[in-house]
Amino acid sequence: MSHTDAEMMMATQIAYLNVDYSDRSGSKNVYDIVTAILKDYGTYDSKTGKYVPKGALSGQVKAQFETAQNIMDLAEKNNTTSWRNWEVVDVCNNEESSGFYACLIDTGDENAIVGCRGSESSSAKQTVLDWGVADVGRLNNPETLQQNDATQYMKYLYEKYGDDYNNFSVTGHSLGGSLATHSAISAPEDMQAKIDKVISFDGPGFSDEYLNSHKDGIDRVKDKIYHYEYSFVGALLIQPEGIHNRVIKAHDDEVKSDICWRHLVRHHTRNVEFDE
C-alpha cells in the first residue's frame, strides 16, 4: 500500500512526539497520544474547536503541545483520518548523544512508516546537536553521527520487524527529510527491496563526499525517493542524482514583508498544500 503525501506528512509530525513521555494511558495509538498531550496541557475551546494552552508553556512541553496541535490541524486541513488508527511500535531516542530520533509507525495492513525527526530548538544541547553537528556537519563529510545512527536503526528495524511488514515507507521534514533519504540509501539491501516510498519534505541535500561514498545505495533506491522543495532549506547542498526532485507550492502568508524571512517561514510543515 502506498501512503499519500498527506499521510507521509502526518508521519513526519508523529516523529516529533515523545511517546515514552506522553503515553500516560499506556496506549501506543497515535490519536490517544495526541489527545492526551492536548488535554494535559490545554483547554478545549468549543468556539474554535481547538485546544489552547492552560498557561505559559516552554521547552519540551511547549514543543509537544504545538506538535499535537499541528497534527490535528494537518488532519483537518487535508481530511486525513487514517492516522487515528496508527500505532507507534518502536522508538530510537539518541537525543542525549547524537541528537537522532526516529520511530516506526504501524499503519495497518502489514505496512509501516519510519518517521525521522528534524531539527529542534527546545533546549540548548539539542540546538547544537541538530543545527550544528548534524546540519553544518554534513559539509565535506561522508557521514554524520545522526546519519550513522539512522543506518544502525534501519538495520535494527529490519532484523526485528522485517518479517512483520510487506512494505516500509520512510519520511521526515527538514533535517528529518535528509535523514529519511539517508535511511533508505543505507538500509540493508533486503529492506531496500521492501521500501515503497521515501519522501523528504524540504530536506537539505548532501556533500560530494557523501554522494560518492554512498553511490551504490543511491542507485538501488533512487527511483523510490521524492524530494519536495519549497524553501531555501530544501535547496541547500546537492540532492542525489536520479531521485524525484520537485518544487512544490507552499504558503508564506504569515509574514507580509521581507522576502528572505518569508522564504524561511514557508519551510514549516503547516504551509504545504496537498492537491491533485
Image (cartoon, helix red, strand yellow):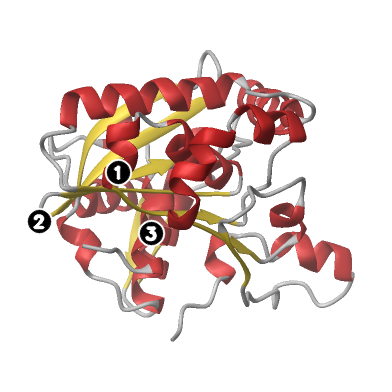
Amino acid, disc 3:
Met
Establish if 94 lies above or below 5. Answer: above
Judged from the image, the secondary structure of the residue bearing numbered disc 2 is: loop
Q: Quarter of the image for the C terminus: give it.
A: bottom left
* Residue placed under numbered mark 3 in the picture: 8
Rendered image: mark on residue 109: 2
Q: Amino acid at mark 1?
A: Ala
Q: The N terminus appears in which quarter of the rendering? A: bottom left
Measuring from the top left, give residue 141's x and y in whole percent. Answer: 73, 24
Q: Of residues 152 and 116, which is closer to you in this image?
A: 152
In the rendered structure, which amino acid carries the disc numbered 2? Asp
Q: Percent from the top left, x then y, of residue 212?
A: 68, 32
| The label number, if any, that marks residue 90 in the structure image | none
**Dot 2 or dot 3, earlier in sequence:** 3
Q: Is residue 123 left or right of residue 236?
A: left
Please tell me which residue lies in front, 219 or 27. Answer: 219
Of residues 192 and 233, the one drawn nearer to the viewer in this rendering = 192
User: x, y percentage for residue 108?
Assistant: 12, 54
Can you tell which mark lies on residue 193? 1
Q: Indicate which disc, 2 or 1, sits on the residue closer to the N terminus.
A: 2
Q: Say whether marks 3 and 1 touch (CB < 8 Å).
A: no
